[in-house]
Amino acid sequence: MAYTSKTIDFKGVNDKLMNDPWSLMDRLGLKYRRAGKIAYVKGYPASGDNSFVVFCQSGTFKDFSGGKQGDLIDLIGVALNFSNQLESLKWANAYLGHGEVTQLDPEVARRAHVRREQERQRHQAQQDERSRKMVGYWATLPAIGGTVVETYLREARGIPLDLLGKLPDVLHYEARAEHADDETGEVTYWPAMVAAIYRGSQPLGIHRTFLQPDGSGKAPVRPSKKMYGQMRGGAIRLTRGASGLTPKDALRRGVKTPLLLGEGIETVLSAACAVPEYRAWAAGSLGNLDIAWPEFVSDVILLKDNDWKPPAMKRFEAIEAHWRQLAKARGGRVKIASAAVGSDFNDWIVA
């Protein structure tokens, strides 16, 4: 039986796919880790950092690193690299045993596009509001001075914070942060280092690192770090460099400073101790290193880990190409830095 354009029901097709999303993902060849009704898809991005998530109960997915999101029909298009939605619908109907969609009426397609765009805007507005609330909560938390967060950074990670001139304002202390285990759903409470994530002047979310009660290391939970809200295009702005200016003030005064940009907070702070005159930002994940070139940045130094596997290295090469293209357009420079000892700069600083 062939479906005509008048019988196409986007929601109906997606609802049927939701009956068994696990089999759908298996059929699509996706590798994933199952956590309750959530699937963390591996290989999207290459760093495998839980950024690509399929929410099986709602029949939706989101790539927190790449920015893509949609329903299971859209997931088919992403997984199979289809160029348009008709191809995804054809595949979905064949998969469900309904035959192919033989045509897609332009008006049907237009209405579907309008509905999806309205849903996207509604979802984005909800995310933006949630992000504002998260960063608002972060602002109520105390600074890290004299807390187990400072103990963790200085003693457990060996970072000589005095070389920075001051403790990072972006890092706050949460005495009792809730943690839900990705595998079991078990809820426990731990002290946490909490950082705000910004893109320009827009608050995107927060990053938590769960710690042992005495600050002697990370908490024994899975995962020990979590990001809440949005991340794409944002960063954790750890230090301000020699100028000491906020991005807004630096932009207003026309002051440009080199930027150290790396993946994790501890790695970037360790590198920043060697060049405290540079700004230092943590992207939170490898897939998020390809942010926009800040107007108040003169040059960019990308921090590369030594233990990345081939897929991650391939992703980093694409990120490096992204920055070199931006540098060419802006007249800036891009350099790559990696630790001489260990996997990253924190390993090197404590070696």
Image (cartoon, rainbow, N blue to C red):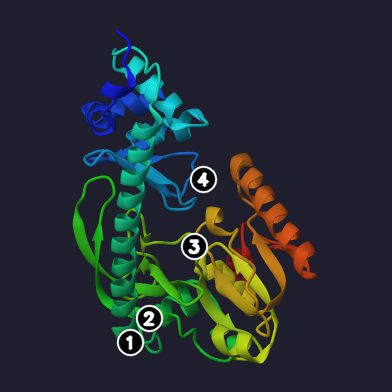
Q: Indicate the quadrant where residue 15 lies.
A: top left
Q: Disc 4 to disc 1, how far (Cα)?
A: 34 Å
Dot label at residue 284: 3
Q: Residue 303's spot in the image, x, y percent?
A: 65, 63
Measure the C-alpha gap from mark 2 to mark 1: 6 Å
Q: Residue at x 25, y 61 (%)?
A: 179
Secondary structure beneath disc 1?
loop
Left or right side of 96 for 337: right
Q: Are marks 2 and 1 in contact (CB under 8 Å)?
A: yes
User: Going by the picture, which residue comes out furthest to the front?
Assistant: 107
Marks 2/4 in contact by CB < 8 Å: the verdict is no
Quarter placement of the N terminus: top left
| 4 or 1: mark nearer the eye | 4
Mark 3 → mark 2, Cα distance in angstroms: 16 Å
Q: Bin the neighbour count of mark 4 within 10 Å (Cα to Cα): few under 14, some 14-19, many 20 and up.
A: many
Q: Residue at x 35, y 22 (%)?
A: 92
Residue sitting at 48 percent across and 59 percent down?
A: 232
Which comes sooner in the sequence, label 2 or label 4? 4
Indicate the secondary structure of the residue bearing disc 3.
Answer: loop
Judging depth in this view, the residue of 350 and 195 nearest the camera is: 195
Helix, strand or loop for disc 2: strand
Distance from Cα at disc 2 to Cα at disc 4: 28 Å
Label 3 vs 1, first from the N-terminus? 1
Dot label at residue 172: 2
Which of 164 and 117 lies nearest the eye of the viewer? 117
10 Å crowding of disc 2: few (<14), some (14-19), many (20+): many
Q: Residue tagged by mark 4? A: 45
Amino acid, disc 2: His
Residue at position x 48%, y 45% in the image: 48
What residue did someone put label 1 on?
A: 142
Residue lying at the far top of the rendered structure: 1
**Image quadrant where residue 259 sits:** bottom right
